[in-house]
Image (cartoon, grey):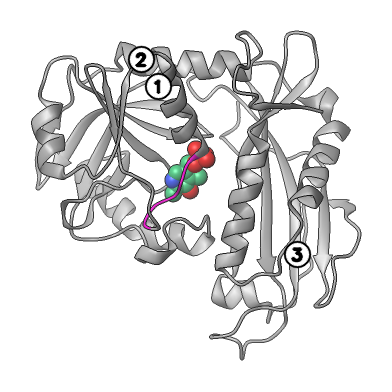
């Protein structure tokens, strides 16, 4: 199977804000875009995106997971970037229209359809370094994706970065392109120097998240993760896993987690850690590299609690377990 996100369905649905109103969404080829070279996004990164998935159900129907949450987050990102506002229902209609059109092409679990709404400032004006784009483009790109764990789930190695932040502190909750550019250098250095899979950003000892996933620590019956603030991305998977953990009677602690506490708990037998995000759902973390020293989390291998929470979430997405929180939208 080709790498995640490299295969696209041939057309996408796209809408233009022309400076005064949204034009009706249109189907356009998904392999090209016409932008003025002076478009705001190309110079000043006025862009945000979302990532959500649609799953084929046992009865053949297609269900989209927690679409309302992703739409709300995209509206918030757009707002914080001063991009033109859109009606949440208009984006919901674009997503369901796009998914319905390609329903027959959506593979069966563990494969799925990854949905990538993207919003960008298109006003052709390079004089607006400190002013918003008054025009924008909103499209919904579709990419069938395979089983993330084909070849077996392996516990990740994370470099814990205490001196650098992933992005500017007020931008953490915005799913915006510039933040990934900002995390690129520390991430590549961590690969090169420590053979790390990802960087866990913990500026000043405050454990936040990695470049594209949230971090969760599981110690016995307790699951610990940073409380929501503007410094990191509020993952839909994070919130879903915490809900499932609460449902099964675990103690959910959304609070500050310091690197010192993380190190102390990590060494306990049975301790587990994971990254959460739409692409990989929940992936075990086995090793932390802190100040050049390696710390194993629990056994260092994928643990049973992470696996069981991942299975439970997958079973809801795949229609094998009752959707008791109403997370699925059928198209
Ligand atoms: C998208 C993303 C996540 C995960 O969010 P989900 O809604 O769970 O997919 C976490 N952190 C960052 C930086 C992200 O971009």
Please determine whether, in this image, residue 307 is positioned above or below residue 65. Answer: above
Q: Quadrant of residue 52?
A: top right
Give the labeled residue for mark 2: 249
Please determine whether, in this image, residue 140 is positioned above or below residue 296. Answer: below
Please determine whether, in this image, residue 235 is positioned above or below residue 284. Answer: below
Can you say which quadrant of the picture contains the C terminus? Answer: top right
Give the labeled residue for mark 1: 246
Mark 1 or mark 3, earlier in chain: 3
Q: Position of residue 193 (x, y in %)?
A: 20, 48
Q: Nearer the viewer, residue 235 or 167?
A: 235
Quick check: 291 left or right of 58?
A: left
Q: Nearer the viewer, residue 180 or 319?
A: 319
Residue range corresponding to the magenta coloring:
231-235
Give the labeled residue for mark 3: 137
* Cα gap from disc 1 to disc 2, whole angstroms: 5 Å
Look at the image and say whether residue 95 sits in the magenta stretch: no
Q: Are marks 1 and 2 in contact (CB under 8 Å)?
A: yes
Helix or strand or loop: what does disc 1 sit on?
helix
Helix or strand or loop: what does disc 2 sit on?
loop
Helix or strand or loop: what does disc 3 sit on?
strand
Please determine whether, in this image, residue 262 is positioned above or below residue 46. Answer: above
Q: Position of residue 231 (x, y in %)?
A: 36, 57
Which residue: 82% across, 42% down? 10
Which residue: 60% across, 9% down? 321
Q: Which mark is residue 35?
A: none
Q: Position of residue 28 (x, y in %)?
A: 87, 53
């Amino acid at each position: 199977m080709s790498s995640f996100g490299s295969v696209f369905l041939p057309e996408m649905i796209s809408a233009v804000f022309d400076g005064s109103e949204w034009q009706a969404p249109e189907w356009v080829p998904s392999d090209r875009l016409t932008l003025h070279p002076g478009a705001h996004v190309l110079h000043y990164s006025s862009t945000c995106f979302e990532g959500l998935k649609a799953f084929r159900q046992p009865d053949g129907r297609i269900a989209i997971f927690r679409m309302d949450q992703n739409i709300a987050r995209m509206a918030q990102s757009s707002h914080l970037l001063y991009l033109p506002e859109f009606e949440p229902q208009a984006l919901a209609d674009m997503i369901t229209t796009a998914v319905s059109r390609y329903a027959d092409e959506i593979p069966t679990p563990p494969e799925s359809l990854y949905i990538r709404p993207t919003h960008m400032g298109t006003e052709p004006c390079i004089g607006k370094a400190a002013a918003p784009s008054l025009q924008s483009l909103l499209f919904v790109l579709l990419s069938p994706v395979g089983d993330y764990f084909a070849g077996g789930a392996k516990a990740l190695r994370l470099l814990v970065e205490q001196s650098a932040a992933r992005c500017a502190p007020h931008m953490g909750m915005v799913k915006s392109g510039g933040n990934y550019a900002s995390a690129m250098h520390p991430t590549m250095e961590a690969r090169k120097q420590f053979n790390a899979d990802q960087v866990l950003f913990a500026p000043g000892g405050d454990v936040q998240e990695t470049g594209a996933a949230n971090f969760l620590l599981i110690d016995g019956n307790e699951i610990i993760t940073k409380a929501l603030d503007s410094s990191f991305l509020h993952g839909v998977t994070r919130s879903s896993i915490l809900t499932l953990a609460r449902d099964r009677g675990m103690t959910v602690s959304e609070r500050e987690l310091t690197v010192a506490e993380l190190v102390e708990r990590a060494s306990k037998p049975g301790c587990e850690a994971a990254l959460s995000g739409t692409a990989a759902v929940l992936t075990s973390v086995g090793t932390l590299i802190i100040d050049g020293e390696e710390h194993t989390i629990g056994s260092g291998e994928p643990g049973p609690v992470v696996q069981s929470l991942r299975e439970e979430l997958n079973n809801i997405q795949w229609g094998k377990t009752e959707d008791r929180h109403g997370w699925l939208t059928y198209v």
